[in-house]
Amino acid sequence: MRLTRKSLLRRVKTSIDRKMLSNHRMVDFIICGTQKGGTSALNKYLDEHSQVCMADKKEVHFFDDESFFLSSQLDYSHYHVSFRPKDSHKLIGEATPIYMYWWNSPRRMWEYNPRMKLIVLLRNPIERAYSHWNMEVSKKADSLSFWEAIQTEEERCREALPLQHRVYSYVSRGFYLEQLRRLWSYFPKEQVLILKNEHLKYETAETLDKVCRFLEIENMNNVKSRDIYSHPYKSKINDREKSYLKNIYEHEIKALENLLGWDCCDWLVC
């Protein structure tokens, strides 16, 4: 018999009640994307909020870890061990930016807690791709030049099929529309806050106020913008690489503008 959305929600609620009895506190919100989009900074700011308990480490990687979901009997204690909330903490949260990109993560997060709130930070996909590549090179996870990496991405990512590639997905992670629609297919839009990376960076206080209103916690006073986990690149993206990615992303960026009511023209003149 086909289950309706209402009956599915009833089942999930029952599951939530059981988990709350055994684990006491559930995770209330996740900063779920995008990688290299400012998630480390937002995680740090919220970690300093008196009403918020963030995970012991950034990037818990529970909902994208396939090994936890091989069994039909999920053990959420593997997830909850990453959190140590106090009675004074109103909310529990974490930041794992790959959740937005990983196909199975939104469904798994919804099955865990359909009332969960999600925060998404979006960055110019051209800059994001170059920052991602720089990170992987610095970790010695990739030895190709940026040009070679983006030219051969599709071929190299096949080695991870049927899953996505965690390292070489420089260009594919910048197609935000598909990722947002996947989130919205499980979570109502009012449970998903979408922010521009530039706003967190240059309009920090106002953006954090928006985050606090969304999470229904007290505002953070006297917060100043800080450069968190930012490292200089050995070289800049060149004109050929930039032009190539502009051609790839132009339609995506304009569609994103229409969908979110944003002005992203600066993303195409970077």
Image (tube, rainbow, N blue to C red):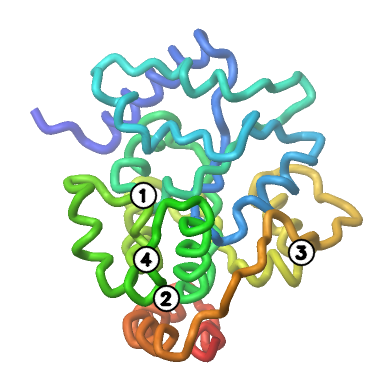
Residue 18 position (above or below residue 151):
above
Q: Position of residue 59 (x, y in %)?
A: 54, 39
Look at mark 3 in the image and give the residue it sits on: 204
Tag 2 residue: 256
Front position among marks 4 and 3: 4
Which of marks 3 and 2 precedes in the sequence?
A: 3
Amino acid residing under circle 1 = Arg
Q: Secondary structure at mark 1?
A: loop
Q: Residue at x 29, y 26 (%)?
A: 69
Q: Residue at x 34, y 24 (%)?
A: 68
What's the distance in space between the residues labelled 1 and 2, CA to CA? 24 Å
Of label 4 and label 3, which has the lower sequence position?
A: 4
Q: Amino acid at mark 3?
A: Thr
Query: Residue drawn at (32%, 63%), measured in percent from left and top?
Result: 178
Report the front residue among 227 and 214: 227
Is residue 40 in sight in this rendering? Answer: yes
- 215 or 125, which lies in front? 125
Q: CA distance from mark 1 to mark 4?
A: 16 Å
Can see residue 176? no
Dot 2, how many residues are within 10 Å of its Cα: few (below 14), some (14-19), or many (20+)?
Answer: some
Secondary structure of the residue carrying numbered label 3: helix
Residue 153, x across and y down, in percent: 27, 66
